[in-house]
Image: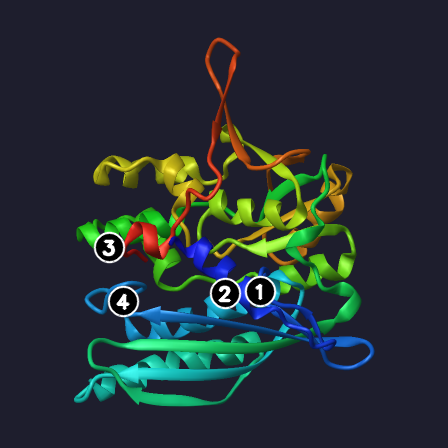
């Protein structure tokens, strides 16, 4: 079973019937009714040593920050505000106390910046390696929550930043390539210390102009396929419009990798992926600019199923390639960042 099949199997067995549950498995967060006007948003993510991080090059402060960012990214992707955090820490006997204190310092610093608070959790002995699981509880106005399921045919597809940078940074770190290069520093930092687009997600949701939204964690090819499945539509991406590919050329040459592949399926971008009427471009761009960001149109929602990449040849012809679910999968890839 791959990761998607595991999740689908669990979802089929869960069969929730509680009327307070507005959305269960299948979106960035579970959505639970809080009162007449507001909802709770719940999400959880795990970081496992040698799978999600390598202590040889991942500073503990930045890992603590990343543990928070990857979770609050889900909250922001549904238009919510992170409020509370639960931490489960699994550590071997004789763990490095200085390392752990630095990790917690980064974690609490990130919580303050995103406006949430650690309220509890669990600590356990681990037989091998470090494991950290965070549960984040957020809140939102019930009528402003943006789900994955609202995409409509002819919607434009946007992302909130360049793609593939974190994957390129991880490749550089794994290869031990550390030239004095500011561009490479940016790539490495995208892997080590990603920034969640919480404020932008909140503003996009409050605008009422966005039909569907999620964050990019497993790569555009896989995450867009999830959004399309939930919405009952298909999508066409245009290779020429993928933002950030040019920034990856030098790293790709040194590592022997494909920059377009990084952009489509590298994972851990933690940008927002959203759809809306193409006529909303000016308004949505203004919202992003107010958040200090830019948005990039990368494709269009279509009637049908699946995700197709369109490449334009020099002779003017187009080549279509099916790319759905080609991003990171723990049980297909084996390990990764």
Which comes sooner in the sequence, label 4 or label 1? 1
Toward the right, the furthest residue is 36
Whether tag 4 and tag 1 are in contact, CB under 8 A, the answer is no
Whether tag 2 and tag 4 are in contact, CB under 8 A, the answer is no
Q: How much space separates mark 3 and mark 2, taking CA atoms? A: 35 Å
**Which marked residue is nearer to the observer: mark 1 or mark 2?**
2
Left/right of residue 50 with respect to residue 282 in the rendered view: left
Residue at 68 percent across and 52 percent down: it is 149
Left/right of residue 17 with respect to residue 248 in the rendered view: right
Q: How much space separates mark 2 and mark 4, taking CA atoms? A: 33 Å
Find residue 122 and report its horizontal and vertical position in percent.
40, 89
The image quarter containing residue 47 is bottom left
Q: How much space separates mark 4 and mark 3, taking CA atoms? A: 9 Å
Find residue 4 and report its horizontal and vertical position in percent.
46, 54
Q: Which residue is mark 4?
A: 58
Category of crowding for the residue at label 3, using alpha-carbon neighbours closer than 10 angstroms: few (below 14), some (14–19), many (at least 20): many
Category of crowding for the residue at label 4, using alpha-carbon neighbours closer than 10 angstroms: few (below 14), some (14–19), many (at least 20): some
Residue at 21 percent across and 84 percent down: it is 92
**Which marked residue is nearer to the observer: mark 3 or mark 2?**
2
Which comes sooner in the sequence, label 4 or label 3? 4
Q: Which residue is mark 1?
A: 25
Q: Nearer the viewer, residue 305 or 75?
A: 305
Numbered disc 4: secondary structure: loop
Q: How much space separates mark 1 and mark 3, taking CA atoms? A: 34 Å
The reply to whether residue 14 is in sight is: yes
Whether tag 4 and tag 3 are in contact, CB under 8 A, the answer is no
- Looking at the rendered structure, which numbered label has been put on residue 10? 2
The relative height of residue 16 versus residue 273 in the rendered view (above or below) is below
Q: Which residue is mark 3?
A: 173
Numbered disc 1: secondary structure: loop
Whether tag 1 and tag 2 are in contact, CB under 8 A, the answer is yes
């Amino acid at each position: 079973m791959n990761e998607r099949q595991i999740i689908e199997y669990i979802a089929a067995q869960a069969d929730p019937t509680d009327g307070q549950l507005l959305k269960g498995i299948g979106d960035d967060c579970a959505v639970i009714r809080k009162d007449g006007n507001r909802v709770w948003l719940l999400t959880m993510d795990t970081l496992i040593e040698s799978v999600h991080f390598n202590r040889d090059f991942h500073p503990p402060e930045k890992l603590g920050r990343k543990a928070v960012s990857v979770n609050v990214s889900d909250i922001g992707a549904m238009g919510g505000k992170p409020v509370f955090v639960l931490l489960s820490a699994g550590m071997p006997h004789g763990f490095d106390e200085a390392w752990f204190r630095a990790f917690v310092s980064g974690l609490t610093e990130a919580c303050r910046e995103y406006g949430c608070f650690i309220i509890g959790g669990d600590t356990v002995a681990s037989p091998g390696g470090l494991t950290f699981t965070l549960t984040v509880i957020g809140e939102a106005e019930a009528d402003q929550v943006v789900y994955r399921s609202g995409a409509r045919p002819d919607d434009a597809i946007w992302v909130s930043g360049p793609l593939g940078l974190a994957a390129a940074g991880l490749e550089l770190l794994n290869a031990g390539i550390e030239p004095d290069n500011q561009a490479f520093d940016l790539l490495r930092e995208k892997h080590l210390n990603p920034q969640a687009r919480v404020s932008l997600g909140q503003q996009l949701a409050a605008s009422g102009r966005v039909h569907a939204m999620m964050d990019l964690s497993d790569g555009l090819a896989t995450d867009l396929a999830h959004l399309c499945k939930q919405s009952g539509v298909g999508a066409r991406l245009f290779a020429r419009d993928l933002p950030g590919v040019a920034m990856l050329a030098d790293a790709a040459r040194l590592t022997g990798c494909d920059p377009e592949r990084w952009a489509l399926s590298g994972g851990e971008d933690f940008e927002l992926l959203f759809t809306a009427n193409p006529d909303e471009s000016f308004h949505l761009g203004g919202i992003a600019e107010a958040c200090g960001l830019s948005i990039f149109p990368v494709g269009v929602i279509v009637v049908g199923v699946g995700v197709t990449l369109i490449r334009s040849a020099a002779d003017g012809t187009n080549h279509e390639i099916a790319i759905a679910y080609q991003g990171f999968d723990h049980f297909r890839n084996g390990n990764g960042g």
